[in-house]
Image: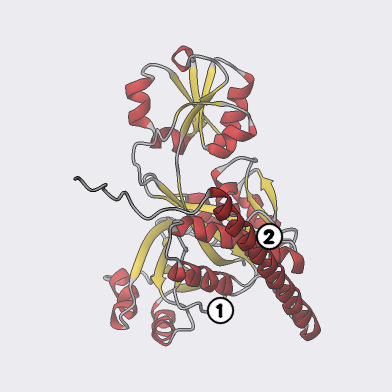
Amino acid sequence: MSKKKKTGVAKAPIGTLRGKIDALDEKIQALIGERAQLALDIAETKQRTGENNFYRPEREAEVLRNVLARNKGPLSAEAMARLFREIMSACLALESRLRIAFLGPEGTFTQEAALKHFGHSVETAPLAAIDEVFREVESGNAQFGLVPVENSTEGVINHTLDMFMTSPLKICGEVELRIHHHLLGKGNDPNSARRVVSHQQSLAQCREWLDANLPGVERMAVASNAEAARLAAADVGAVAIAGDSAARLYELKIYASNIEDRPDNTTRFLVIGTQETAPSGHDKTSLLLSSRNRPGALQRLLAPLAKNGINMTRIESRPSHQSMWEYVFFVDIDGHAKDRKVAKALALLEKEAAFLKLLGSYPKAVL
């Protein structure tokens, strides 16, 4: 007589499971309310002591890293971080609602990065150019700004680097956003499109796909992907390359998803503000340097980093705009300016460099 094969542990009835979910939801909601009240208590304490910096980048980064360390699944690390980011954003809005300037218009990847970093309980203010974002924060009309600084496929955004030469603003944080480009439009057949519109970097990031799928179709560069989506919404003869936000905003069909040539295509954004950021334990420091005009100048300039065991993660050169053939170097290093080794290296750098500007120490991107 054959025995029945066991297929697994018997599950509780759906009604029972839903009852457990309802009970957990009640507890979660009560705990979130308790957390929000504590945020208000902290705000009152800060106001009594005269402190007005309600947003602390190092504290936010610490909370998120603790969330990721505790996560055991089944939700992904990214999903769990997103949930807690929104809880923190809502709690912070009870203390002080932040206004974040970003490179617009609405629906750009820069806005996506701003919401990824600050959550949806902030006010986002789109501006037409990178220098306008800097000026909005410098004037105090926005507490922070968000600007792109480099793409893993197309390299650095020079305009952002150049702004740091004269701006008094500090780098307070960074955001890394995986960039997924979609082909969007209003018509029924993308193959009948007369032109493809997008930002010049997005056109470059999707070059191979366009060559294979829309050969011979005119490619027109515009100021932003969101502007491209707006144009495609008004013209059935145009298709746009843009992201999910632009597709939703302009109610466009997604003809093809993830058409970027490199699946790891990522853009790094910088959070800019007026405040200095305290150490979080997982930090990065950005510097602006120029060397003295003598043989081996760059090697001598960077020697203090190697001598103190400091890892340099990026170096870019830009014309100084002061005199012909003079260059400045943008350097990223591991660690915070207040770390002992980094502070020692910076003291030596200051003696060696013709010019040294600390652009900021800030938490490394969390996810």
> Does residue 184 appear to the left or right of 25 in the view shown?
left
Extreme-left residue of the structure = 1
For the point 32% across and 69% down, which residue is it? 298
Whichever of callouts 1 and 2 sits on the residue coming sooner in the sequence is: 2
Q: Nearer the viewer, residue 265 or 135?
A: 265
**Quadrant showing the N terminus:** top left
Residue 137, label in figure: 2
Residue bearing mark 1: 278
The residue under label 2 is which amino acid type?
Answer: Val
- Would residue 186 be seen by someone viewing this image from the given angle? yes
Q: Residue 74: image x %, image y %?
A: 43, 57
Describe the colour scheme in one phrase.
Answer: secondary structure
Residue 315: mark: none
In the displayed structure, would residue 174 be above or below residue 210?
below
Q: Hey, what amino acid is under mark 1?
A: Ala
- Number of numbered markers: 2
Give the quadrant of the C terminus: bottom left
91 lies left or right of 215: right
For the residue labelled by badge 1, is the local secondary structure a helix, a strand or a loop?
Answer: loop
Residue 292 percent location from the top left of the image: 38, 72
